[in-house]
Image: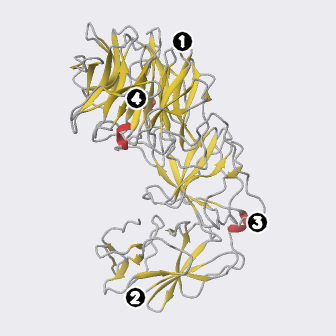
């Protein structure tokens, strides 16, 4: 399947809109019930050797929910959090709003009062599971007793139905294809949704238990994001062919006849007002997509612009890229709720962010946390710092395992979730997060910071070995990090020393003063000690002007001169003046 089809603000080949983010409109989470997830016990006693941390910054827009009157007045923010709320759905009685929100790297379904108060999650994520667990796109049944939503709880993107209180979530589609974006019919008997079972994305109907599947759209164009007319006879869908702006179409449920909606040349995510007289949708006529409300009879349009202040000018948040998403009308048709966020401005410095960035860290071999500098390319084996109820979830996304490694509580206490790596060493794991904001809550660490236990800052009796050329740090999956020269020495240091005509990596640990971790041979191949690195064969990437292997420590901003071996590998040449020919090889 093409996951891009479901990105909340994804610029995709098929949608052609908005910048990619980590939140997906698709589905699912890690817990199939509304039971509160209980953390594994905090590790105690001797903290039994293979990980490390250095943070980067990954810009990710945090959407908030807003309500606005149908005429564009009365704009009100319902949420102002870093957790990223999206895809709201107003309850039939007008008293509640269901929505999806990020929680510790996962996406869960939550509800709140129509005024933004009383937020409560209908499910809790299993933080020990992969961050790919997503639940999203809630849709109320007309009687308000059930909620349909998209989820990948069973390992595939499916449509689920649960009680409005979060009880009894169950899969109603059970198909290996991707099913998403449920929409409950006004009579409560059917659910429309997207599926790519036919090869591309089309709209289907089924009974509320998943039976009696019927296709509503077909053809080479994708059709998705269905919403119902109030009388239940028609669906408003987004139609798109590759590399062409999306358009809105009205589909008769019985005849399946498609009629272009003539209120705009292009648009998507259209939603009828309860009386059918207006449509809220994203329009694409000029510039960035904007949320608009169009009167179907007069063709007059009201544009919703969160960026404009009371005087009509741009607000302080006017820099950057606006990102609007799906609207949902209140049952009285007087107002609707929608999601809005700001992408970073292209002119904004990475060190002066306009909003919360998702800074990435790396986890060290002994449980250390490290941050790197701004602009370091993303690598495998990182830890994403995700907002979690006033603190953070430190979510590991490396190739060996994926899940939450630790939780930073609002009081800055670090709670380690038992990591699923055999013989994991936590001897240098910090117990307290040292950075707070002006409200006393945990703050993102500065670049080039190192968070470790006190005993790890200076290994007892550690001295550079003879012939030392530089030093690095070892990551969980065999990655290296070349720290800033000012970074403190820790228990997981890798010394790089002269060895015959090449180099050796000498590992410094608390239990072993110096041991050979890896050796570089004249043919550029790196040979590792037994029971250490098990990834792809690695080769040294630097040679001098005469073709001899040479050591280049780097500038403190990169991870080191090595990459997977291959005939097409670009070999870096270090010239006598210190210049380097070529570009840094990519580490798989």
Q: Earlier in the sequence, mark 2 or mark 4?
A: 4
Which residue is at 52% across, 41% downward? Answer: 153
Q: Which mark is residue 325?
A: 4
Which residue is identified by label 3? Answer: 46
Residue 176 in picture, x, y percent from top left? 40, 43
Front-most of 513 and 277? Answer: 277
Residue 42 in picture, x, y percent from top left? 73, 53
Q: Earlier in the sequence, mark 3 or mark 2?
A: 3
Which residue is identified by label 2? Answer: 522
Residue 56 in picture, x, y percent from top left? 49, 55
Q: Looking at the image, is 76 positioned above or below residue 322?
A: above
Which element carries disc 3, helix, strand or loop?
Answer: loop
Total numbered labels placed on residues in the image: 4
Q: Quick check: marks 3 and 2 in contact, CB under 8 Å? A: no
Which residue is at 50% across, 45% downward? Answer: 357
Please say whether residue 320 is visible from this viewpoint.
no
**Which of the two discs, 3 and 2, sits closer to the camera?**
3
Q: In this view, does 405 lie to the left or right of 250?
A: right
**Which of the two discs, 1 and 2, sits closer to the camera?**
1
Q: How far apart are marks 1 and 3 (CA)?
A: 56 Å
Q: Which of marks 1 and 3 is nearer the N terminus?
A: 3
Front-most of 15 and 379? Answer: 15
Which element carries disc 4, helix, strand or loop?
Answer: strand
Badge 1: residue crowd in 10 Å (few <14, some 14–19, many ≥20)? few
Q: Distance between the residues labelled 4 and 1?
A: 23 Å
Badge 2: residue crowd in 10 Å (few <14, some 14–19, many ≥20)? few
Q: In which quarter of the image is residue 270?
A: top left
Which residue is identified by label 1? Answer: 93
Which residue is at 52% across, 25% downward? Answer: 147
Quadrant containing the N terminus in the rendered view: top left
Q: Earlier in the sequence, mark 4 or mark 1?
A: 1
Q: Quick check: marks 1 and 3 in contact, CB under 8 Å? A: no
């Amino acid at each position: 399947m093409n996951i891009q089809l479901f990105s909340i603000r994804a610029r995709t080949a098929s949608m052609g809109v908005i910048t990619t983010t980590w939140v997906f409109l698709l589905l699912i989470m890690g817990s199939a019930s509304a039971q509160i997830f209980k953390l594994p016990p905090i590790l105690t006693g001797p903290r039994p050797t293979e990980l490390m941390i250095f943070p980067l910054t990954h810009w990710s827009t945090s959407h908030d929910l807003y309500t606005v009157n149908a005429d564009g007045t009365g704009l009100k923010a319902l949420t102002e959090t870093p957790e990223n709320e999206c895809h709201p759905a107003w309850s039939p009685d007008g008293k509640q709003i269901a929505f999806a929100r990020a929680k510790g790297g996962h996406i869960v379904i939550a509800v709140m009062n129509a005024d933004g108060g009383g937020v409560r999650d209908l499910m809790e994520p299993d933080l020990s599971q992969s961050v790919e667990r997503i639940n999203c796109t809630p849709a109320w049944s007309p009687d308000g007793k059930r909620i349909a939503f998209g989820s990948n709880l069973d390992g595939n993107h499916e449509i689920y139905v649960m009680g409005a209180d979060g009880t009894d979530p169950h899969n109603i589609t059970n198909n290996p294809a991707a099913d998403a974006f449920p929409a409950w019919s006004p009579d409560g008997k059917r659910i429309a949704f997207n599926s790519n079972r036919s090869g591309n994305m089309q709209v289907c109907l089924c009974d509320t238990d998943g039976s009696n599947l019927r296709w509503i759209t077909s053809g080479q164009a994708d059709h998705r994001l269905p919403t119902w007319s109030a009388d239940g006879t028609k669906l408003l869908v987004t139609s798109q062919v590759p590399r062409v702006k999306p358009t809105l179409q009205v589909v008769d449920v019985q005849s399946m006849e498609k009629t272009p909606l003539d209120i705009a040349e292009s648009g998507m995510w259209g939603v009828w007002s309860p009386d059918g007289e207006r449509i809220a949708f994203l329009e694409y006529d000029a510039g960035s997509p904007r949320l608009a409300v169009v009167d179907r009879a007069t063709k007059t349009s009201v544009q919703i612009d969160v960026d404009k202040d009371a005087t009509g000018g741009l607000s302080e948040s006017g820099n950057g890229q606006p990102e609007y998403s799906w609207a949902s009308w209140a049952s009285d048709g007087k107002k609707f709720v929608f999601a809005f966020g700001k992408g970073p401005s292209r002119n904004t410095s990475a060190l002066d962010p306009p909003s919360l960035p998702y800074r990435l860290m790396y986890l060290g071999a002994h449980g250390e946390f490290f941050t790197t500098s701004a602009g370091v390319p993303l690598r495998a084996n990182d830890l994403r710092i995700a907002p979690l109820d006033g603190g953070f979830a430190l979510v590991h996304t490396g190739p060996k395992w994926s899940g939450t490694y630790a939780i930073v509580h609002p009081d800055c206490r670090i709670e380690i979730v038992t990591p699923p790596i055999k013989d994991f060493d936590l001897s240098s794991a910090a117990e307290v997060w040292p950075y707070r904001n002006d409200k006393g809550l945990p703050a993102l660490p500065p670049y080039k910071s190192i968070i470790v236990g006190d005993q790890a800052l200076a290994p007892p009796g550690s001295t550079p070995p003879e012939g030392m050329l530089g030093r690095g740090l070892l990551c969980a999956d065999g990655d290296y990090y070349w720290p800033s020269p000012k970074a403190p020495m820790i228990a997981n240091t890798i010394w790089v020393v002269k060895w015959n005509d090449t180099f050796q990596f000498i590992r410094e640990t608390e239990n072993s003063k110096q041991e050979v971790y890896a050796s570089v041979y004249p043919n550029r191949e790196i040979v590792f000690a037994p029971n250490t690195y098990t990834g792809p064969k690695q080769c040294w990437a630097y040679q001098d002007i005469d073709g001899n292997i040479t050591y280049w420590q780097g500038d403190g901003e990169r991870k080191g001169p090595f990459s997977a071996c291959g005939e097409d590998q670009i070999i870096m040449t270090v010239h006598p003046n210190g210049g380097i020919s070529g570009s840094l090889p990519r580490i798989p």
